[in-house]
Image (tube, helix red, strand yellow):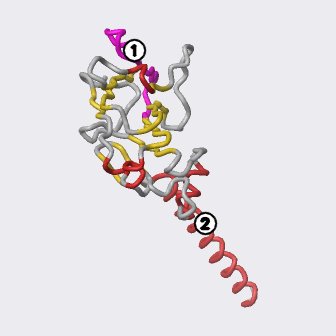
Amino acid sequence: MTSRRRVVVAWVATVTAGALLGVGSAWLWLTCTDPAGTRIGPWLVNLEAGSTDASLYTRARIALKALLALDRRETLYYIAQQDDAGRPLRSRCRYLISGSIPAARWWSVTAYADDLFLFPDAEQRYSVSGETTLNTVGRFSAFTGPETPVSGAIKWLPTPGDRGLILTLRLYNPSPEVQADPGALAVPSIQRQGECP
């Protein structure tokens, strides 16, 4: 092999290795790291989502995960992948989600599998929202889990299988106070109920 050919082969190998390392590290960062944002208990809110000031990585993460993000004046997104005790959420476990009504025109809590798709359910119970979940003192409560809870009085989001669970709290037209400081929201608690098989 001539010296010129060795130089070309070395150059091609270096460029290829650099490209693979760059693409691989970007992919790992986008898919395996915790997104930037403010953590409030088990919930994380990304203040850049939907903003024209969002970084390129934030935009890429939103595009990659197929989420439509609106400006925080329209919608705030709080994501939870762990319970109040810091344990990862699992679909096979049962959780009680409860809290005061968020300061927004409308709100919802949706259960997603770890691939960011909804869990299959013939009755299409994918989220709880609004006044349908209120108890007598004006708080809301809902269960998640693979089996129907004993009490039918509380809303239930079925999460069949054994995989990761992601909860998303959406606030539509949040109050000006919450828009100014999303970290000040009294977020719902997520408490595991009983043992997790």
How far apart are labels 1 and 2 at the CA level?
Answer: 44 Å
Residue 59 occupies quadrant: bottom right
Q: Which residues, given as a range, are shown in magenta?
A: 148-165
For residue 20, which numbered disc appears in the image? Answer: 2
Q: Which of 37 and 129 is in front in this view?
A: 129
Closer to the N terminus: mark 1 or mark 2? 2
Pinpoint residue 173: horizontal percent, then vertical percent: 49, 42
Is 34 one of the magenta-colored residues? Answer: no
Residue 130 occupies quadrant: top left
Residue 129 occupies quadrant: top left
Q: Which of 156 and 30 is in front in this view?
A: 156
- Which kind of residue does numbered mark 1 sit on? Glu
Q: Label the magenta part by its dominant secondary structure.
A: loop
- Circles 1 and 2, Cβ within 8 Å, touching? The answer is no
Residue at 54 percent across and 52 percent down: it is 71
Q: Give the foreground label among 1 and 2.
A: 1
Q: Which residue carries the number 1 mark?
A: 147
Split into 4 quadrants, where in the image is the C terminus? top left
Q: Is residue 24 left or right of residue 12?
A: left
Q: Which of 136 and 93 is in front in this view?
A: 136
**Label 2 element class:** helix
Pinpoint residue 191: horizontal percent, then vertical percent: 27, 30
Residue at 35 percent across and 44 percent down: it is 43
Pinpoint residue 125: horizontal percent, then vertical percent: 50, 20
- Which kind of residue does numbered mark 2 sit on? Leu
Report crowding for label 2: few under 14, some 14 to 19, many 20 or more residues within 10 A (C-alpha). Answer: few
Q: Is residue 152 left or right of residue 48?
A: left
